């Protein structure tokens, strides 16, 4: 017996009987164990050591070149009713899915060891945290889970006491993309993933548990599991504000969570609570509180440097695992956007030449680090009650149309704003990049149930509370033929400052058909070289283009049929009406 909990012991025995590993190892989560796994992977050739003088305790992992990102077309939600998964998800009937996976998992670990990882998503002593156990045959997964979750003996103890945990079964299988599936059984608190060793496909605590399964639990238990960063902002007066923001994958969450204030913002302090996932609960006063279920970051490497984000750059100088970056002539990691070093190997390990048209690092290359590595880590990330959220910010990557920032008229309109998010696809998922798609609340790949029900759940909060956060939308990615109109990164604090002042009811705004837009004097541009023309462009709202956008959104909503809440359509009609009115009055 490895645990006194029968449910857990029986399940692990069952998985072992099916997958047939040579040995079963229960992880204790100690630093020593982590170092042993690193040594094992160095031995196996799964990792190589990076320059120990400049990048101490940092390692490079090269994944299979066919296994470099999430695979949305192979990700399924297996609910008994197809409609519960919704057309935002791929669906398979649960019995059929289990049969298919049983075949794939049968003997898949023979000759390999199986590792049992008990983990706790969220602070160990928080009532909002939820536990899980991932069983895997990948030492890389163990090492990543060590850096990113609270895993090991303490989590096991909580699981034994609660007798409740999400069961996650993972095997890299033979990495054949044809036999790759990431399947979720929310009604059974179960995840089964095979054929990939990469990120969100394999680190089951992250997207699979903390978003897809947790969003289902959150619906049943009246809370929210969201693809959101959580950031703490302190102004020079010493007032602290906590903002949660949902942007799609590779659209700026980690960077906003680790923001460095511009020089002219003297006295401002920004600290990170979380960079990817937030679990939100309402207290008796109707205030939303957020915890970050994770304790580490799996962040996009390309673009990270001392100028764009000094914190992120410092965070990955030691004790980091790099996946799919290139190498310099002195064995340092290298990627597009790195300001120094001479790259000589690309992410596949092939020779790299400066004049190559290929990428040196894979566009979805990632770093894994403990959150404690972050120089601006907030201790409140460990607070069992979380932090009180004053603003929720949605955003997307839109080279056209969408202004730098606007504020929703109220909560229900804010739900429309979130549900309408469109964003250009990125390398975080397999498939074409740069194509605008609807990504409601940045949850298209991560909502574990029908979006119609999800929007209804969001809307229900305005009936439960008078104290909800204000809702905003931002877009750091507007472009003209010269590139980005807005400098982004640290300068985004100028926009957050406006958001905070709106939350304090300190300033007025322009009421437009799509929401409140800043009065020009209220965005502090001191010390920023931005032309008036660009600034005007960033706040311009073209009613005709917005009418076309709203038509597109309506077509998308209509696909959800009966599950689509009427209130959302009402909000949509309101916006259309104001857009049309604005056109008439300007004629
Ligand atoms: P996931 O981990 O996939 O969920 O991504 P994320 O939302 O955390 O995105 P991240 O902060 O890692 O940024 C993704 C890419 O966008 C990186 O290449 C960044 O350099 C770039 N980026 C982030 N913020 C900004 C910004 O304000 N402006 C511009 N132009 N680029 C940005
Ligand atoms: C994302 O794609 O949103 C990520 C990376 O945060 S992964 O963990 O692979 O999902
Ligand atoms: Mn993410």
Image (cartoon, rainbow, N blue to C red):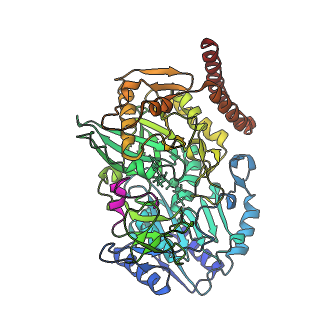
Work out whether 407 lies above or below 91. above
Q: Residue at x 35, y 50 (%)?
A: 272
Q: Is residue 382 visible?
A: yes
Residue 314 lies in the magenta-colored region: yes
Q: Nearer the viewer, residue 211 or 540?
A: 540
Q: Is residue 2 left or right of residue 306?
A: right
On screen, residue 344 versus residue 22, left or right, reads left
Q: Between residues 67 and 389, which one lies in front from this camera angle?
A: 67
In magenta segment, residue 146: no
Residue 229 is situated, as x and y percent measured from the top left of the image, at 44, 48
Compared to 74, does 584 lie above or below? Answer: above
Quarter of the image that includes the C terminus: top right
Q: Residue at x 52, y 53 (%)?
A: 250
Q: Position of residue 544 (x, y in %)?
A: 65, 26
Residue 91 picture location, percent across and down = 73, 55
Residue plotted at (36% across, 48% down)? 259
Relative side of 76 to 481, left or right: right
The quarter of the displayed image where residue 288 is located: top left
Residue 1 seen: no
583 vs 453, nearest the viewer:
583
Q: Which residues are magenta?
A: 300-317
Query: Please, what is the dominant secondary structure of the magenta stretch?
Result: loop
Q: Quadrant of residue 284?
A: top left
Q: Position of residue 200 (x, y in %)?
A: 55, 62
Q: How many marks?
A: 0
């Amino acid at each position: 017996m490895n645990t006194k909990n029968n449910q857990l012991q029986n399940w692990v025995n069952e998985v072992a009987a099916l997958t047939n590993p040579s040995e079963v190892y229960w992880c204790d989560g100690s630093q020593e164990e982590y170092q042993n796994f690193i040594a094992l992977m160095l031995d196996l050739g799964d990792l190589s050591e990076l320059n120990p003088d400049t990048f101490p305790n940092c390692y490079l992992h090269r994944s299979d070149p066919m296994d470099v990102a999430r695979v949305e077309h192979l990700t399924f939600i297996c609910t008994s009713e197809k409609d519960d998964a919704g057309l935002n998800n791929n669906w398979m009937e649960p019995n059929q899915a289990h049969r298919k996976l049983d075949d794939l998992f049968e003997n898949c670990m023979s000759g390999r060891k199986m590792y049992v990882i008990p983990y706790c998503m969220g602070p160990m002593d928080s009532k909002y945290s939820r536990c899980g156990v991932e069983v895997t045959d990948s030492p890389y997964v163990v090492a990543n889970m060590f850096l990113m979750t609270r895993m090991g003996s303490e989590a096991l103890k909580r699981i034994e006491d609660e007798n409740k945990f999400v069961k996650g079964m993972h095997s890299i299988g033979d990495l054949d993309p044809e036999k790759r599936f990431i399947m979720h059984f929310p009604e059974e608190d179960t995840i089964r993933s095979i054929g990939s060793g990469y990120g969100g496909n394999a680190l089951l605590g992250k997207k699979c548990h903390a978003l897809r399964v947790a969003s289902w639990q959150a619906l049943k238990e009246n809370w929210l599991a969201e693809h959101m960063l959580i950031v703490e902002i302190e102004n020079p007066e010493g007032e602290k504000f906590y903002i949660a923001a949902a942007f799609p994958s590779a659209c700026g969450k980690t960077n906003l969570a680790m923001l460095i204030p511009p020089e002219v913002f003297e006295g401002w302090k920004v600290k990170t609570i979380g960079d990817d996932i937030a679990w939100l609960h309402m207290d008796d006063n109707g205030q939303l509180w957020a915890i970050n279920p994770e304790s580490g970051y799996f962040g996009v490497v390309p673009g990270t440097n001392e100028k764009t984000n000094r914190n992120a750059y410092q965070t990955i100088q030691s004790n980091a695992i790099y996946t799919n970056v290139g190498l310099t002539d002195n064995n340092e990691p290298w990627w597009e956007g790195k300001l120094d070093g001479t790259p000589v190997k690309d992410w596949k390990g092939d020779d790299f030449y400066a004049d190559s048209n290929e990428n040196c690092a894979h566009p979805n290359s990632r770093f894994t680090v403990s959150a404690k590595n972050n120089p601006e880590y907030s201790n409140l990330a460990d607070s069992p009650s979380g932090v009180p959220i004053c603003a929720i910010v949605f955003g997307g990557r839109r080279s056209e149309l969408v202004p730098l920032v606007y504020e929703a008229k109220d909560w229900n309109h804010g739900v429309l704003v979130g549900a309408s998010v469109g964003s250009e696809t990125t390398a975080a998922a397999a498939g074409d990049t740069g194509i605008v798609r609807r990504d409601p609340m940045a949850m298209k790949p991560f909502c574990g149930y029908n979006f119609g029900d999800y929007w209804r759940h969001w809307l229900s909060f305005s009936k439960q509370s008078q104290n909800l956060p204000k809702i905003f939308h931002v877009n750091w990615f507007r472009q003209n033929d010269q590139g980005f109109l807005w400098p982004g990164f640290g300068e985004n604090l100028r926009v957050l400052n406006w958001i905070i002042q709106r939350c304090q009811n300190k300033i007025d705004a322009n009421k437009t058909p799509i929401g409140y837009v800043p009065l020009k004097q209220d965005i502090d541009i001191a010390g920023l070289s931005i032309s008036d023309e660009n600034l005007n462009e960033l706040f311009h709202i073209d009613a005709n283009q917005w009418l076309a956008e709203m038509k597109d959104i309506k077509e998308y909503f209509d696909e959800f049929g009966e599950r689509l809440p009427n209130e959302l359509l009402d909000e949509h009609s309101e916006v259309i009406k104001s857009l049309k009115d604005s056109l008439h009055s300007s004629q």
